[in-house]
Image (cartoon, grey):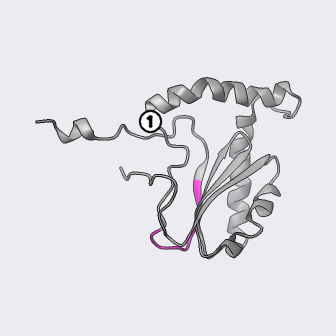
């Protein structure tokens, strides 16, 4: 008889320390997204491409810093501050992940109208290159796996 541990999923970890935080928490039951958490095998698959993508920004003359990931902590700090000082999107549950000047917004909103202007709001943050929204209306079934509790 196989043990339960044999069927357990590999542990997830934020291997690269990508900024990941909840910006809004108004909708009860909204599942926390996986964000930057990955298995060790996924981390190993991502490692080489992260190095290439991080430095290509500098090599192309599009970044002053030698790696695009070096902007992420400052972007996350600015976003935390901007969300803390704004009432925008206050009726949503939102998590933000910042990776190489890209901001991924995941979570639940009351309606698609409630998300209007979200990309523009986030993109006004210095050094943000791209905003990717992965949102669901209400607390329906998300199109991302829920983060396991540990």
Q: Nearer the viewer, residue 31 or 86?
A: 31
In this view of the protein, can residue 77 be seen by the observer?
Answer: yes
Residue 23 horizontal/vertical position (percent):
62, 63
Q: Residue at x 78, y 27 (%)?
A: 56
Magenta span of residues: 21-29
Q: Quadrant of residue 57?
A: top right
Q: Residue at x 43, y 41 (%)?
A: 12
Which residue is denoted by mark 1 in the rendering? 39
Task: Label 1, secondary structure: give it.
Answer: loop
Q: Residue furthest right?
A: 61
Q: Residue at x 71, y 73 (%)?
A: 88
Q: In this rendering, would 25 be left or right of 124?
A: left
Vertical order, 2 against 103 (above or below) = above
Q: Quadrant of residue 91?
A: bottom right
Q: Nearer the viewer, residue 8 or 82?
A: 8
Vertical order, 47 against 99 (above or below) = above
Q: In which quadrant is the N terminus drawn? A: top left
Q: In this rendering, would 8 be left or right of 31?
A: left
Q: In this rendering, would 111 be left or right of 129?
A: left
In this view of the protein, can residue 87 be seen by the observer?
Answer: no
Vertical order, 51 against 5 (above or below) = above
Find out whether residue 97 is within the magenta segment: no
Residue 17 horizontal/vertical position (percent):
57, 39
Q: Residue at x 52, y 35 (%)?
A: 15
């Amino acid at each position: 008889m196989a043990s339960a541990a044999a069927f357990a999923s590999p542990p997830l970890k934020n291997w690269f320390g990508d900024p990941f935080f909840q910006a809004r928490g108004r909708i009860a039951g909204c599942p926390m997204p996986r964000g930057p958490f990955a298995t060790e095998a996924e981390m190993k698959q991502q490692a080489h491409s992260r190095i290439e993508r991080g430095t290509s920004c500098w090599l192309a003359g599009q970044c002053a810093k030698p790696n695009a990931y070096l902007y992420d902590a400052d972007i996350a700090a600015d976003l935390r501050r901007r969300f803390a000082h704004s009432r925008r999107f206050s009726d949503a549950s939102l998590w933000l992940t910042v990776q190489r000047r890209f901001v991924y917004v995941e979570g639940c909103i009351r309606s698609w109208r409630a998300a209007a202007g979200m990309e523009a709001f986030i993109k006004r943050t210095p050094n943000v290159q791209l905003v990717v929204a992965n949102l669901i209306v209400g607390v329906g079934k998300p199109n991302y796996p829920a983060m396991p509790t540990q």
